Image (cartoon, rainbow, N blue to C red):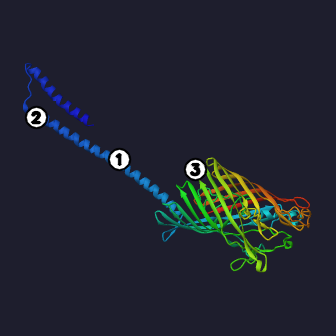
């Protein structure tokens, strides 16, 4: 712009000089002269033009700077507005009370259950009670509706300082069964404690404390060792699937993370033992005391085992960049009292096991593979099939039963609205059998009477040797929007219960189950 104005000014000055010279050649061809006054006038005009150019150029630069600043300001306003909208959306997901953020969760469920053989169970199947043909229920089907898996949860979170965070979590469903809960008229099912715990997280040292009832530390996680990332199979059955290792119980857990990539945790968890008592146990030479009737605060229909040492679990988890991997160890103590009079004494027997688990994104955000497995002695209570932990030797000593459990499955995310899954699992126990003076004792004894297992009304001991299961299902999220999520799911499973060989053979019982579920997640 400046160069154009200067060019115009110079051209104007040269034009005046040329005109004067041309006029001079016509009248006086000898010598052309320009007087001092004319020259000063031209110089003054040129100076005025230069000042005008400088003024215009200054205005133009100021205008350009203003445009840049305006664009920058508009961009900053847009970013700030976007951040404000995102923050407002995030904040709208929570309630705030005295600096504590509250997050509501859960779902409302309407579900149906159909089984080819009656278990007398609601939406949580009793895999180890699939009836043989000696039972009348082994010849009848069952069907029922249920809303009891509906769930409510509340998460409270606060920051003590930028590096210290505290939280509390409570989660409940309606699968509790008090004596007033029946199917007659007004069902009156009562709330049930699923998880109730507090956590404290210290960022700088990478330490995480959990105290209260939660999923057992040995349950597979999807990320690190982090609460509320437990990777249960996606089935509808509230007892999950045979082969899945889990528990929900009170515990005190401490976890150390190493850069949020590797994790090491230890947990002391509430002990309880499940027993198999031989039908001939009264004929054993030594009788023992191994449990007690439930007292204050418990249902009197239940019993409590005599454990006095907590279950101890140690787990290492890794998130190296592809997939999630775990390995854990479990230590348990079993406790009873036997002999009588002055010779009576307490006795400890130890058991436990180890396990592994992994989650692999075989195709990122499309196909996931899940695997978990566990093996040991006295670990039955940690499997969905609920096979017994222990039985008894003739001398009264507790005998832990060896068991292994496996679960594997695929989940195919066909679209944001549809997931299809297929899982297979198995739990198997080894026999722990004894004979004393011709009396069959223990678990899985081949002298037990199985002759009537396939005859309605017949006699059948039928100790379970293994349970295996195949499951196929889907979840269709038919609404996802500002009002939450609504989905429909269906699940089919086939389970086979196989007994140890006894007198009369090795009976089997099969169960085909179909579940459907409508669920609404408002939060």
* Residue 359 image point, x, y percent: 64, 52
SS for callout 3: loop
Give the label, 1 or 2, closer to the camera: 1
Write down the residue under mark 2. Answer: 40
* Residue 121 image point, x, y percent: 78, 67
| Quadrant in the picture for residue 441 | bottom right
Write down the residue under mark 3. Answer: 320
Task: Please report whichever mark, 2 or 3, sits nearer to the chain's N-terminal start.
Answer: 2
Tags 2 and 3 touching, CB below 8 Å: no
The span from disc 1 to disc 2 (Cα, nearest Å) is: 42 Å
Tags 1 and 2 touching, CB below 8 Å: no
SS for callout 1: helix
Give the label, 2 or 3, closer to the camera: 3
Q: Residue at x 77, y 72 (%)?
A: 183
Using the rendered image of the protein, determine whether residue 492 is visible from the camera's viewpoint. yes
Where's the N terminus, which quadrant?
top left
* Residue 193 image point, x, y percent: 66, 70
């Amino acid at each position: 712009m400046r160069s154009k104005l200067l060019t115009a000014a110079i051209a104007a000055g040269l034009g005046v000089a040329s005109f004067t010279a041309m006029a001079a050649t016509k009248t006086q061809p000898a010598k052309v002269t320009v007087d001092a006054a004319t020259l000063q006038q031209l110089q003054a005009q040129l100076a005025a033009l230069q000042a005008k150019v400088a003024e215009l150029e200054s205005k133009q630069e100021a205008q350009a700077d203003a445009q840049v600043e305006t664009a920058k300001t508009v961009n900053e306003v847009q970013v700030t507005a976007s951040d404000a909208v995102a923050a407002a959306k995030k904040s709208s997901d929570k309630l705030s009370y005295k600096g504590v953020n509250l997050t509501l969760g859960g779902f409302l469920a309407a579900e149906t259950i159909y089984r080819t053989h009656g278990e007398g169970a609601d939406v949580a199947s009793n895999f180890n009670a699939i009836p043989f043909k000696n039972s009348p229920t082994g010849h009848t089907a069952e069907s029922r509706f249920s809303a009891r898996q509906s769930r409510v949860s509340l998460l409270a979170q606060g920051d003590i300082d930028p590096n210290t965070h505290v939280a509390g979590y409570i989660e409940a469903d309606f699968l509790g069964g008090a004596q007033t809960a029946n199917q007659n008229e007004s069902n009156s099912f009562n709330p049930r404690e699923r998880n109730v715990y507090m956590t404290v997280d210290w960022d700088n040292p990478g330490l995480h404390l959990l105290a209260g009832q939660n999923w057992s530390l040995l349950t597979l996680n999807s990320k690190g060792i982090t609460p509320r990332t437990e990777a249960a199979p996606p089935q509808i059955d509230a007892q999950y699937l045979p082969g899945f290792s889990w528990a929900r119980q009170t515990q005190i857990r401490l976890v150390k993370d190493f850069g949020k990539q590797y994790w090491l945790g230890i947990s002391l968890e509430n002990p309880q033992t499940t027993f198999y008592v031989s039908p001939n146990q009264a004929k054993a030479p030594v009788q023992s005391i191994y449990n007690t009737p439930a007292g204050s605060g418990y249902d009197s229909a239940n019993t409590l085992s005599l454990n006095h040492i907590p279950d101890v679990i140690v787990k290492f988890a890794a998130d190296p960049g592809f997939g999630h991997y775990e390995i854990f160890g479990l230590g348990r103590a079993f406790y009873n009292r036997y002999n009588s009079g002055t010779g009576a004494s307490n006795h400890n027997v130890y058991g436990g096991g180890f396990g592994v688990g992994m989650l692999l994104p075989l195709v990122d955000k499309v196909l996931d593979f899940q695997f978990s497995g566990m093996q040991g002695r006295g670990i039955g209570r940690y499997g969905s099939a609920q096979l017994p932990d222990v039985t008894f030797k003739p001398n009264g000593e507790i005998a832990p039963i060896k068991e292994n459990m496996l679960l594997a499955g695929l989940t195919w995310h066909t679209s944001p609205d549809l997931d299809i899954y297929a899982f297979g699992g198995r739990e198997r126990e080894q026999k722990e059998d004894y004979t004393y003076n011709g009396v069959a004792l223990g678990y899985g004894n081949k002298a037990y009477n199985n002759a009537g297992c396939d005859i309605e009304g017949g006699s059948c001991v039928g100790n379970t040797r293994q349970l295996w299961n195949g499951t196929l299902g889907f979840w269709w999220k038919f609404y996802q929007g500002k009002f939450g999520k609504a989905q429909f799911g269906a699940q089919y499973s086939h389970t086979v219960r196989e007994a140890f060989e006894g007198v009369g053979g090795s009976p089997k019982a099969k169960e085909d189950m179909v579940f459907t579920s409508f669920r609404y997640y408002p939060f």
